Structures are given as C-alpha cells and as structure tokens.
Image: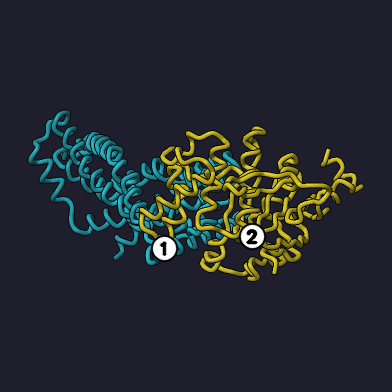
Chain colours: A cyan, B yellow
Amino acid sequence: MYLIISFIAEVQAICLLAVHAIGGLFKNPRYTRDHFQQMDDIGVKSTGLAMLTGLFTGGVLALQSASSLKAFGAVNLTGQLVSVALVVELGPVLTALMLAGRVGSGISSQLGSMLVTEQIDAMRALGTDPVKKLVTPRVLACTMMLPLLTVIADFFGLVGGWLVSFYTLKLNTALYWSTSLNALDYRDALEGLLKPVVFGFIVGIVGCYYGLRQKSGTRGVGLDTTRAVVTADILIIASDFFLSKLVIEV
Amino acid sequence: MPTIRFENVTKSFGQDLVLRGISLQVREAETKLVLGSSGSGKTTLLKMVPGLVKPTSGKVFVDGKEITRMTEDELGEIRQNIGVVFQENALFDSSTVGENVAYRLLEDGLLSSREIQTTVLETLDFVGLRQAIDKMPAELSGGMKRRVAIARALVGSPRIMLYDEPTAGLDPITSRKICDLILKLRDLEKISSILVTHDLQSAMTLCNEMALVESDGEVRFQGKKGSFGLNNTSFVIIRDGSIIFEGNEEDMKSSKDPYLLEFLN
C-alpha cells in the first residue's frame, strides 16, 4: 500500500513539475541563451552516440534477420525487415535509452549538485524561478532534439544494414535500398517520429525531477541520478508499448 | 516597525521538529548574532526570511508584510530587498565571478550592459576583488569566494543582509576581513542583518567594534569604549530549536545558564 501511495505521489510531483516547466515557456524573462546552450549540450553533442547506436543496430538487424530469412529463401527481403524494425521500434527506443543514459543522468546530477550546494536556493533568493531557468530549457531541448537524433540513428542504421548486406550477405545495393525504403509508409514515419517526442520529454522531465528532489549530500545526488536513469528507461519502454498499440489501433 | 519579525514560528521536516516557537525581532540597522551548535535550526531560521523555507506554523514579517502565505511571484518583490550569503557560498560554478555578481541585474534586464559592468566593478571594489572579475569560482580561495558571495548579495542595494556562517572555515586574518565588511555594511550602510555563526571570536569582534569614516574618507574600525555594549548588535542563542537566550554581551557573560557557560568556553 505504501509503495502504491508513494508511486502515485511521485507521478503527481512529476506532472506538477511538467506543468510548471511548460508554463515557463510563456512567461518573461525568456532564457534564450540557456535554451540554445541546452540544445547544443543535449542534441548536437549526442549526434556521435546516435550515429554509432544506429550503425550497429542496423548491422546486427541485417545479420540476424538474414539468418532467419535464409530458412525461407528470402534473404533479399533483409532490407525490408531492417528498415521497418529500425524506423518504427529500435531507432526511437534505443536512441531514447542512450539519451537517458547520457543526458538524463547528466541533468539529474548537475541539478542535484546545484541543489546540495544551495545554488538553487541562491537562484531563488536572487529572484529567479529555477524551474523556468533550468527545467524548461532542458525539457524543451530533449523533446526537440530526440526526434532529430532518432532520424540520424535511423539513417545510420540503414547504412549499417546495407554494409552488412553488401559485404557479408552479398546482396545487391539497389535491391537493398529499394526494398528497405519501399517497405516504409507514412504511418511508420509518423510512429517513428511521434515516439521520440514523447521519449524526449520523459528523459528531460524525469532527469530534472530527480535532480531537484530534496536530498541530503552527494550520496543523495548519486542515488537520485541512478533513479532518474532507471525511471526514464522504464517509462520509455512502457510508453513505447502503449504508443505502438495506440498507433496500430487508430 | 521592526524590519524582520518572527512570530511563534515552528518548523518540522517530517517527524523532526527543527524550530519550536521562535519569536524574534530585528530593528532597522540592527544585527542579530544567532549562535548555536550545528543542527540547532539556525540555517532554517535564516532561510525563512526570504521565504526559501516556509514555516510549519507561525508568521514571518519582512518590512511589515507577512510573507508566510506569499506565492513565489509575490516573494520576488520581497527578495529584491534581501541579500543572502549562503554557508558554502553557493556561487554559480559555471559562471565567472563577474557574471555571478551581475546575476541579479542580468535577470532584471533593466540596465544596459555598460551600467551593469559599472555596478559590478563598484561592488567588487567594495569587497576588494576587482582583479578577480574574469576568474571562475573554482579558481578562488575560500576567503575570496566568501567575498564574492557577499558582493553578489549586495548588488541591488538590499536593506537586509543574511549571513550563514560567514567566517566558517576561514583563517583568523581572512575572518577579520569578512568581519570588517559586515561592520562597514552595518554601520555605514545601515543594513539590518541576521548573522548565523558558531565562531565566537568573530561574533565578539562584531559586537565590540564599529566602523567609522574618518575626515579623510578612510574607513576605520574602533573598539567600544568603556562598558557600553553596542546597542545595534545583540545575541540570540538557539538550542534544539528554541531560543534560550536573547540580549547583549554583558548579559550573556553574566548568565549562569550551564549550557551558555559551556558554549562560551
């Protein structure tokens, strides 16, 4: 019972923080510099990670699906399997999980350190709303940058799949690209871009929530950073299931 | 009208009762030295003045306005008038010294960058750190950080200053410099303040000396004459969340309370 109550309280606190952070978008002063700074830190600096995640995921997808398809003599459909699995599921989910690890933990530990060194109190004492100054730019940056990173991951995934198809499966290049691109329709693209918007928001808000949560000392910062990543990961996987179900039913 | 007034304030964190029925007044240009061992609730008391911590019950008045039920937006106006020097300085470690000191002005966005620059330099001159303007907080020594923290709190000419352990962890000479700054603010700028500390030596300096401006414009510090205590500085001693003593140095030294005697020795 206690667990359920504390879980509900936690969800409520995260929702309140989200409302406050979104409200911050529409009030002066606007911290434009902080917004761009966060987009750079969260988005641009994660491109390498997105590329590598995509490349190897695409490669392994091609390898594994080819070995299953071989049983049916349908190895030349490899491109199709790689592209659908990648764009709809693995691209968004894996990129989001990587972002939760790289950025969610960073946000949580940075805000947590600021909290325990009283920098958050100092900010409030100097007349700043810390949610507006710290949370809003981070959540917005995550929400906007994750879809872009996912597109990069998807593209490099297709390239990874092609590399494997071409060099180890000896498939024709034109065949690979045409089957993989023809397999996608608008619904897949929509699903593949809707998910990262939600996941990005989750990574940002969960990281900020655990960062700003009352804690004692650096041990608390470490614990809450771990919690931020675990919670974000679970929420990403769970919401992926429901989002997929939603899109399939509509 | 007292500048700061606590009316029967209590505060609990979960099961812990940190403050039990505190009533306290700080008049204009007066300094209250709050003494007490660690964990006695001093910092919590201090943070209630700008509304960073809300009391569980009781009321806090600043400039005659009750701040206990104010929203964060309403508190913004009250906080314009309050400078806080935090225990660990709480400097923004990703910004330079200059940006830290300019923070409040940059937030308000009312002044041009040239005017901000002038104010920042003036304030840094006051604490004697003009040369450190482009340094990062991590490059500074403990005493310099503390002075930057004071400078940051002073920007915007607050009428109330709150110091949380301003001399903790500093050598006697640096402590003395910090005390001089506090004396200058009290005696020359007529700022009301609450100073939380367990450094008895600095507390004695603050209640025994005063800052004066000489005819040549130099600031001089003078010890009190005779047995008159300074009437603008008095002691408050907190133990386990309650005030056990309030009064001047003479009263404190003549007290027979065993805890007080132990604390003073």
Amino acid type for the residue under numbered disc 1: Gly
Q: In the image, what residue occupies the spot 65% across and 38% down? A: B176
Camera-nearest label, 2 or 1: 2
Task: Indicate left or right for A122 with B214 as reference.
Answer: left
Relative image position of residue A31 (x, y in whole percent) = 37, 57
Q: Quadrant of the N terminus of chain B?
A: bottom right
Q: Residues within 10 Å of mark 2 (few under 14, many from 20)?
A: many
* Picture residue at 40% right of the left edge, 50% below the top: B117
Quarter of the image with the C terminus of chain B in it: top right
- Badge 1 density bin: few <14, some 14–19, many ≥20, Cα 10 Å: many
Does residue B107 lie above or below A175 as drawn? below
SS under mark 2: loop
| Numbered circle sitting on residue A24 | 1
Q: Are marks 2 and 1 on the same chain?
A: no
Chain letter belonging to callout 2: B
Numbered label attached to residue A36: none
Secondary structure of the residue carrying tag 1 is: helix
- Furthest-top residue in view? A168
Residue B31, given in percent of the width and then of the height, sits at 70, 54
Does residue B118 show up? yes
Q: Quadrant of residue A28?
A: bottom left
> Which residue is the site of mark 2?
B49
Q: Residue B26: which quarter of the image?
A: bottom right
Rendered residue at 46%/38% (across/down): B132
From the viewer's perspective, tell me whether residue A71 is left or right of residue B32: left
Which one is nearer the viewer's eye here, B79 or A4? B79
On screen, residue B257 above or below A31: above
Is residue A230 at all visible to an observer of this figure? no
Q: Amino acid at mark 2?
A: Val
Residue A165 or A117: which is nearer the viewer? A117
Residue A146, x across and y down, in percent: 31, 50
**Total marks drawn?**
2
